[in-house]
Amino acid sequence: MTGTAEGVTAAVRLARRAFVAGERIDLNRLSAELGVDRTTLFRWVGNRDQLIGTVLISLADPTLRGVAERTGGCGPERVGRIMGEFSRAVIEAPCYRAFLRRETERALRLITTRAGPVQRHVVEAVRELVRAELARSDRVPTMPLPDLAYLVTRIAESFIYTDLISGEDPDADKAEAAVTALLRGASRPR
């Protein structure tokens, strides 16, 4: 590797490839593939949890963006459909399910808590989505937008990970219905 930026890019690309293949991200193997020692790899990407978080965000962003681009309508209903389809994409991703089965506690900590980077990132993306859609449909939130975005995200998480939480089947349709209902009730016409 010629520099830190190239090293980071290469490390994330290889880690993402392993994750998508349903494999465990292994820092020893990754450093060997890159031809660097673990200290250099750590300097580039942080610890294993930080790298996994980076990989998860790199998968979540284009998924959410793609769903939003394909989804018509406006307002609470559009946000509900987007979150439902995003939930469906996550539920149906074999690599994601493999990660959840293989490393359940780590996955939930990285994805659904403030201890990991993923939830903060998704909440921020959802905040922007909710802000834009409420404005586009000439509605205003009746509660602080950051709180509303957090609730929308937690609702989606509840139905994505329900098999791990309560033993029930994950259900994207329920996520869509619940998010739509929340946004209808937590916003009003301007």
Image: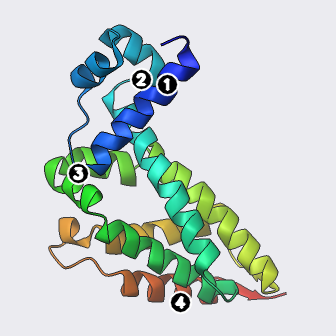
Give the CA distance from mark 3 to mark 1. Answer: 22 Å
Question: Which residue is under mark 3?
Answer: 99
Q: Quadrant of residue 77?
A: bottom right
Residue placed most toward the observer, 52 or 142: 52
Q: Secondary structure at mark 1?
A: helix
- Judge depth for marks 3 and 1 and give the one in front: 1
Give the image location of residue 71, x and y in percent: 60, 82
Can residue 151 be seen in this snapshot? yes
Q: Amino acid at mark 2?
A: Gly
Near mark 2 (Cα within 10 A), the count class, few <14, some 14-19 or many ≥20, is some
Q: Are marks 4 and 2 in contact (CB under 8 Å)?
A: no
Give the CA distance from mark 4 to mark 3. Answer: 31 Å
Give the CA distance from mark 4 to mark 2. Answer: 40 Å
Q: Which mark is residue 46?
A: 2
Q: Which mark is residue 181?
A: 4
Q: Give the number of marks.
A: 4
Q: Amino acid at mark 1?
A: Val
Give the image location of residue 149, x and y in percent: 59, 66
Give the image location of residue 85, x and y in percent: 46, 78
Give the CA distance from mark 2 to mark 3. Answer: 19 Å
Up/down of 122 relative to 130, above or below: above
Question: Which residue is under mark 1?
Answer: 8
Give the CA distance from mark 2 to mark 1. Answer: 10 Å
Mark before the other along the chain sequence, 4 or 2: 2
- Judge depth for marks 4 and 3 and give the one in front: 3
Q: Are marks 2 and 1 in contact (CB under 8 Å)?
A: no
Residue placed most toward the observer, 10 or 111: 10
Near mark 4 (Cα within 10 A), the count class, few <14, some 14-19 or many ≥20, is some
Give the CA distance from mark 1 to mark 4. Answer: 42 Å
Mark before the other along the chain sequence, 2 or 1: 1
